[in-house]
Image: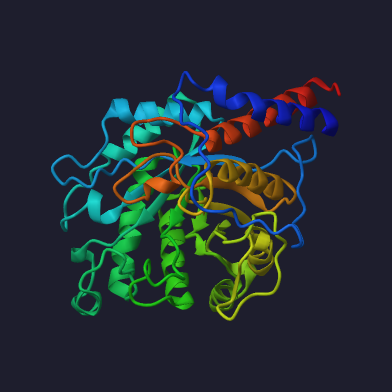
Amino acid sequence: MLAVAVLVLLGLVALAVPALRGIGNDPDGTGTAAAHDDASAPTAERCDVDGDHPGPLLDLGVNTDTGDAADPSLSTAEVRRLVGVAARAGADVVSTTVSWRTVQPRRGATPDWTGLDRVLDAAEARDLQVRVRLIHTPAWALDAASRRATDGSMWTPPRTDAELDRWKAFVEDVLTHLDGRAAYVETWSEPDNADRWATGPNAAAFGALLRATAAARDAVGDSTTMLVSGGLDGNDIGFAQELVDYLGGTSLLPFDLVGVDPYTDLDPAAAPGEPGDDGRLDAFAGYQQVADVTGTGVYVSEVGWSTDDVSRATRATYATTVLEVATCTTDVEALSWYHLHVTPYDPAAYALLTADGRIGPTYAALRAWTETRAAVGATSRDGSS
């Protein structure tokens, strides 16, 4: 079965780009920067999909926030189109971001769930799961001292008791509105990165925020939504250990899956070495050591490469590689490729789609992988080899 899967995958990769011309076409350019390949470096274990290694769920994100206060959400038609593009790539999960500052900009205002509902409806129509990432604190939800300390940055996290109570109430509103329609809810993004945690990364403060999210889930009686900790910037072993220590050990963690954003300057097949001075492992597969620290499964919240750094062809190869590496372990529940489409907040050089909707070889590689997985799964269900 393994040999069949390998042959199928190779054939699909060769055929995928021309086969996708009905969705769009982006020529397989060579890019301007060399890939970070090092043939002499040790490599992480890689596995093809088979009955014992089904691989992680593929997550592709649809961000509905337009950045325009007068018209803040993508249209229903555009959201449906993007979710359709994700579905044709074989995505299992569509992730979307809910900015508290955007949906509830004023104290006491009824939250505006327009963008979220458009994603939920489009995903449900395609039988896809949804991950909702909760970020950004509105200025009204911050104490005066917090606003002064960070000039009211949207990346100022709730930290005081009063701020955490407001966050908990917001999460209760989110979960009540979702009513089980999202499989995963993620708290914040890269709390170990000063750009995303404006008061300076602090594992204890992040632990308190995670506890508030879990308390909100308990308060609404939600027994199905899985909680994901905000993706750690890199494989941040040091921060993960501080978080576990603050929370009292792996048996007391208020989340189900640890989020990791294992970006790397290395070829993703590189084997992890030792953590650097910053406590991080600069290798994609280092997420396994984060999982060892937390004792949980992993949600790869983001991973990707910019075509400013590697060629389009190399990036496509890397997409297959990260899925092969993730397939070798049982740690990875899902993997979110960063990112699907151009937004006001995400660099165009990372996107699978160009601004005018064309696709390229990385999209084709993801689709080839998911088609192989589907074919192997069908064979396994039939009991044939």
* Residue 365 falls in image quadrant: top right
Q: x%, y% of residue 276?
A: 61, 77
In the figure, 378 relative to 266: above or below?
Answer: above
The percent coordinates of residue 249 (x first, y second) are: 62, 73
Looking at the image, which residue is at 40% across and 57% down?
216
Is residue 173 rendered to the left or right of residue 89? left
Question: Which quarter shows the C terminus?
Answer: top right
Indicate the position of residue 21 as horizontal and vertical percent values.
49, 21
Q: Which residue sits at x=18%, y=45%?
A: 68
Relative height, residue 82 to residue 268 (above, below): above
Placement of 53 over or under 272, stated as above or below: above
Q: Position of residue 214 (x, y in %)?
A: 46, 60
Residue 280 visible to the viewer: yes
The colour scheme applied to this rendered structure is rainbow
* Quarter location, residue 95: top left
Is 146 in front, or is 189? 189
Q: Nearer the viewer, residue 284 or 114?
A: 284
* Residue at 36% from the left image edge and 50% from the top image edge: 346
- Could you tell me which residue is drawn at 36 percent across and 45 percent down? 176
Question: In the picture provided, is 213 more to the left or to the right than 64?
Answer: right
